[in-house]
């Protein structure tokens, strides 16, 4: 590593040299690192190849989940949702205690109680966490996907953002097979109610039971709106909306 002197300050790569700025000033070093060919073939990098294979599998599983709920996720997500879901899939993969290293996978991890418990509660929008927004208890019917929120009083049971006048609830019941990369989904009708002191039971029933194999995943969407002259507008472009995995089977 050498220190760059002179009036011309460079940053970037030129031939075999890398120029960069550090607290010591502008520095230059030769390009290093291990070649791709060596990583792919050298026995010394066997662990690296195994880790890379498992990470790639976890990333693929994360993409499958995000794609499966895309129609809901576009209304409630943050700008780091992809990396957070991949991180969650990597954690679930670690619950696979039967596959050899390098072949551990999400599908096997989700077959365990620990894997299911890890996925349950995942929020797709980390700016709006379900447990910090909805305080009323609810139940999930594993056979039908029906979610019931009994005696909901919006002003008491919901932490709603300033400016919100209405709140909507919707749910979905998914079948996701992380081994075959196939998924199906059924949606409930959307319930839209004013944020007031009216108390009523809210029931979200998916249109049907999704077909296919894999894990049963149940999600709940909470959206906030502001009504102006009889028209409801999404509040802050959905920044306060919640999408949460409320149950996994």
Image (cartoon, rainbow, N blue to C red):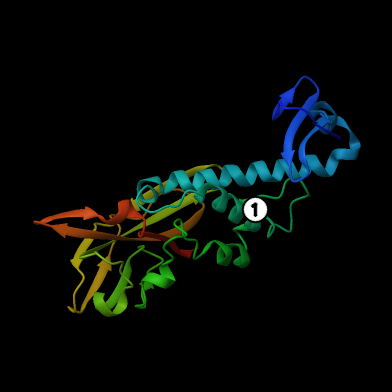
* In the image: residue 215, left or right of residue 72: right
- The one nearer the camera, 214 or 60, is 60
Residue at left 69%, top 57%?
94
Q: What residue is pinned by disc 1?
A: 90
Residue at left 53%, top 42%?
181
* In the image: residue 120, left or right of residue 162: right
**Residue projecting furthest to the top:** 15
Label 1 residue SS: helix
- The one nearer the camera, 148 or 195, is 195
* In the image: residue 52, left or right of residue 230: right
Residue at left 42%, top 53%?
174
Q: Evaluate whether residue 238 shows in this view.
A: yes
Q: Position of residue 229 (x, y in %)?
A: 9, 56
Q: Position of residue 95 (x, y in %)?
A: 68, 60
Q: Evaluate whether residue 187 shows in this view.
A: no
**Residue projecting furthest to the left:** 229
Disc 1 packing (10 Å; few <14; some 14–19; many ≥20): many
| Among the 4 quarters of the image, the one containing residue 125 | bottom left
- The one nearer the camera, 98 or 47, is 47
- The one nearer the camera, 102 or 56, is 56
Q: How many numbered circles does the render carry?
A: 1
The answer to whether 48 is drawn above or below residue 224 in the figure is above
The answer to whether 215 is drawn above or below residue 166 in the figure is above
């Amino acid at each position: 590593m050498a220190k760059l002197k002179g009036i011309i300050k460079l940053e970037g790569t030129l031939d075999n040299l890398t120029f960069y700025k550090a607290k010591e000033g502008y520095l230059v070093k030769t390009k290093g690192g291990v070649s791709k060919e060596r990583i792919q073939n050298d026995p010394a990098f066997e662990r690296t190849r195994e880790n890379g294979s498992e990470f790639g599998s976890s990333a693929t599983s994360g993409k499958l989940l995000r794609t499966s709920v895309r129609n809901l996720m576009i209304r409630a997500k943050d700008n780091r949702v992809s990396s957070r879901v991949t991180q969650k899939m990597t954690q679930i993969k670690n619950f696979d205690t039967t596959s050899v290293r390098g072949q551990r996978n999400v599908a096997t991890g989700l077959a365990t109680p620990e894997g299911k418990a890890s996925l349950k509660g995942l929020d797709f929008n980390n700016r709006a966490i379900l447990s910090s927004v909805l305080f009323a208890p609810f139940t999930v019917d594993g056979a039908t996907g029906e979610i019931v929120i009994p005696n909901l009083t919006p002003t008491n049971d919901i932490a709603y953002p300033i400016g919100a006048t209405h709140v909507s609830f919707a749910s979905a019941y998914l079948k996701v097979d992380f081994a075959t990369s196939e998924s199906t989904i059924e949606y409930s009708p959307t319930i839209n109610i004013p944020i007031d002191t009216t108390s009523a039971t809210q029931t979200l029933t998916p249109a049907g039971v999704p077909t296919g194999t894999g894990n049963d995943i149940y999600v709940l969407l909470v959206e906030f709106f502001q009504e102006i002259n009889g028209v409801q507008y999404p509040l802050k472009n959905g920044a306060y909306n919640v999408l949460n995995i409320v149950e996994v089977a």
